[in-house]
Image (tube, grey):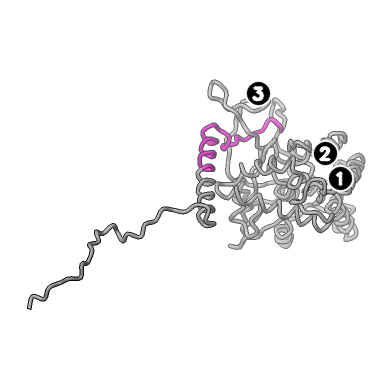
Amino acid sequence: MEIFVYRGEWGLPSIDFECSRLLAYLKFSNAKVTINYNGNPFSSPNGMLPYMIADGKKIAGYGRIVEHLSAAGICPSAASSGKMGDDNYATHINGYMQYVQEHLHPYFMYMLWGDPKNVDTTRTVYAKRIPIPFNFYCPRKYVLRTNDITQSLSGFSLEDSIEFHEVSEFAHNAKTCLNLIATKFEENRWFVADRPTEIDAMLYGYLSVLSKLSLPNNVLQNHIRQCPKLVQFVDRTTTTYFSKEGFNSFTTTGNGQQKNATGSPNDSNSSSSSSSSGGAKSDQSSNKQEFHTGQQQDADDGPKERRKRYIISGLVATVAMVGFAVLNGILTLPYEDTHGHFIQYDDPGDYEDDN
């Protein structure tokens, strides 16, 4: 089995909440699968990541992937031994997951893909992880999905003027949900027990992105920072399970070394895929290097790569605009019906009969 996800940023394994959720699920399950961090959403059946190739078939979306994994016996432990295999306990976890989905997910999606102040930032983050020219098309799917949410739950379209974006109820529900989560972490290391479960993977997906993604208008990030237990949960999960999978963008120093935002040189090489051996804690380095310093170099952030990306993007945009103009009659190409510029002679019509 091979799973394709977005490569991460900010010391996280992935920039996408569903990809991070799935990666955490695999780690908590001690799964041994191949992870490809350079996934192309255009190759996915639904045009989005994550997706999985198993038995020669492509399976897209977190829900369908987890169904396939569960059928193969790959799932997190049910927590403490006294509750192992308890159907009521599983129902308890599913109830909390449904609550988070209903209360946190709508505002989470609106903040990233619906808020006019944030959408360009989010789109840029995703576009850097998608090959050209698919990065012009694939992020649009998230906007359309968010538009479906706002229309069905609040009755407005993202194309409406900003004053019609009524999201106060979304924001209230999301903050209430975060307060509940923080309360649960006051009592336990994990959400409901002494071992991580599927809801912990779900929460890691949401909270890791919200706490690390810098947006012009990130209300939930400010709320999370006021809840130390939520910040500790993200940091603890990342250092324990993703100490070797965290990515960061690097800049080049004067001596040619790669240097991250905190000034530490990069000692590790980037890999397009890795084997997920989750569950066990990663070995800590002697200097106790924290996860946010990053371990893998982002190969797409060098000056040459950026210049190449800008040039190709400009060429693709120019061709697209010219094609649009021609198809819509805005621009016409020169055309002369001269049949190859053959010389035409006048026919006087006064031929003499030689006979």
Q: Nearer the viewer, residue 298 or 27?
A: 298
Look at the image and tell me whether residue 339 can be seen.
yes
- Residue 186 in the image: x percent, y percent? 91, 39
Question: Badge 1 is on which residue?
Answer: 171
The amino acid beneath tag 3 is Gly
Q: CA distance from mark 2 to mark 1?
A: 8 Å
Label 2 close to label 1 by CB (< 8 Å): yes
Assess whether residue 90 is covered by the magenta stretch. Answer: no
Question: Badge 2 is on which residue?
Answer: 219
Left or right of 265? Residue 188 is right
- Residue 247 in the image: x percent, y percent? 65, 37
Q: Earlier in the sequence, mark 3 or mark 1?
A: 1
Assess whether residue 296 is covered by the magenta stretch. Answer: yes
For the C terminus, the image quarter is bottom left
Q: Earlier in the sequence, mark 3 or mark 2?
A: 2
Question: Badge 3 is on which residue?
Answer: 263
Within 10 Å of disc 3 (Cα), the crowding (few <14, some 14-19, many 20+) is few
- Residue 112 in the image: x percent, y percent? 74, 44
Is residue 236 shown above or below 162?
above
Q: Nearer the viewer, residue 322 or 131?
A: 322
Q: Earlier in the sequence, mark 2 or mark 1?
A: 1
Say what secondary structure mark 1 lies in: helix
Q: What residue do we see at 70% from left, 51% from top?
A: 142
For the N terminus, the image quarter is bottom right
Over which residues does the magenta segment extend?
292-314
Residue depth check, mark 3 versus mark 1: number of the one nearer the observer: 1
